[in-house]
Image: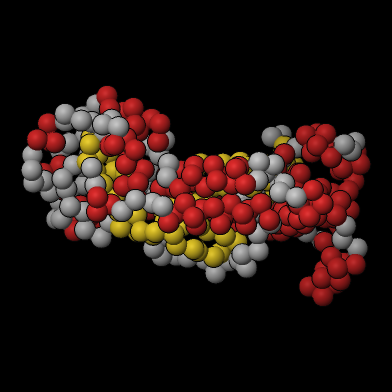
Amino acid sequence: MTSIRLERWIARKFRLRHVELIAALYECRSILKASRRLSLTQPTLTKALQDVEATLGLPLFERSNRGLEPTPYGEIFARHAKIVLAQLRHAAEELESLRVGYSGKVTVGTLLAASASILPDAIARLKIERPGVAISVVVGTYDILVPSLLVGDLDMVLGRLPEEGRSSALLYEEFYAEPICLVTRPGHPLQRKRRLGLRDLVNEAWLLPLPETTLRRQIERAFLEAHAPLPRNVIESVSILTNRVLLRKSDSIGVMPYHVALDDVEHKLLSILPVKLKSMETPVGAILRAPGNLPPAATALLECLRLAARDVPSPRARP
């Protein structure tokens, strides 16, 4: 099928059921599971898929003993189908919000820097103002959350904004600059030292973020700038709960955004090491799909995030 014929077919004959069908098959990877989700019989769903593929002249899925696997064409089709469904959900939310007021759902992806600081404050503010809004929080790394944002599964992603490789399909709003600190349990032998550099810490046990995270790349760059080898005794984790317990129960050194560590420091559960880290302050903010049109509930949460960011304490007054 030529591109002109394909465009005409999509414009004139493509139906919402085709969008739902492809999205369901992509997510379920099974005719049986997708047919149950859509309340269709398996033969009906199989015939509908065959009709779409025949009309397009392109295979969208490959059949195997393990189920369905999307082809490159299927990946593209499914990505756009999910965006269409997300936009329709947003339209329905706006209509419902207009009808009954202050309802809807927000799905937020969060990175470490925002999960323990501004996001809880913003959610608390929003629930006071709009108790009918449902909020889902998904924790992950940048490489996992951003693709979900692009296909419409998330309304926004919060955390440390990337230094490079920013996408024109996304909008980036900075809230504040987040410094990085090194933390240990209180009473750690290193806490008795007044002056420390990264070269003094190479042979210590470290608790670091995963290699694909911005924070991990930053700490590795800091070691290189200090002309020090990278630590070899390393545990990798982005689980804030696991990290907090490990730090309190071992002599590991952790790397944390300052405002993530602040609450534990104030409650004397962790202590900040007196190590100066150069070039380790990066912006924290929100990432949105361009052009940035959010449904009402997500817009309200974004405004609460902006307000919460204004109340973030200055790192100059460190404990």
> Is 92 drawn above or below residue 271 in the view shown?
below
Q: Position of residue 160 (x, y in %)?
A: 42, 54
Of residues 33 and 85, the one drawn nearer to the viewer in this rendering: 85
**In this rendering, would 229 be left or right of 212?**
left
Q: Residue at x 34, y 54 (%)?
A: 178
Q: Place residue 191 in its image quadrant.
A: top left
Residue 217 visible here: no
Residue located at (8% from left, 43% from top): 194
* Residue 213: % across, % down: 39, 49
Q: In the shown orientation, is residue 266 left or right of residue 195?
A: right
Q: Residue at x 40, y 36 (%)?
A: 240
The C terminus, quarter of image: top left
Q: How many numbered badges does the structure rendering display? A: 0
Q: Where does the image place residue 173, in percent across and percent down from the top left?
A: 49, 63
The answer to which of 77 and 65 lies nearer the viewer is: 77
**Do we see residue 204 in this rendering?**
yes
From the viewer's perspective, is 70 left or right of 120?
right
Image quarter where the N terminus lies is bottom right
Q: Position of residue 276 (x, y in %)?
A: 17, 52
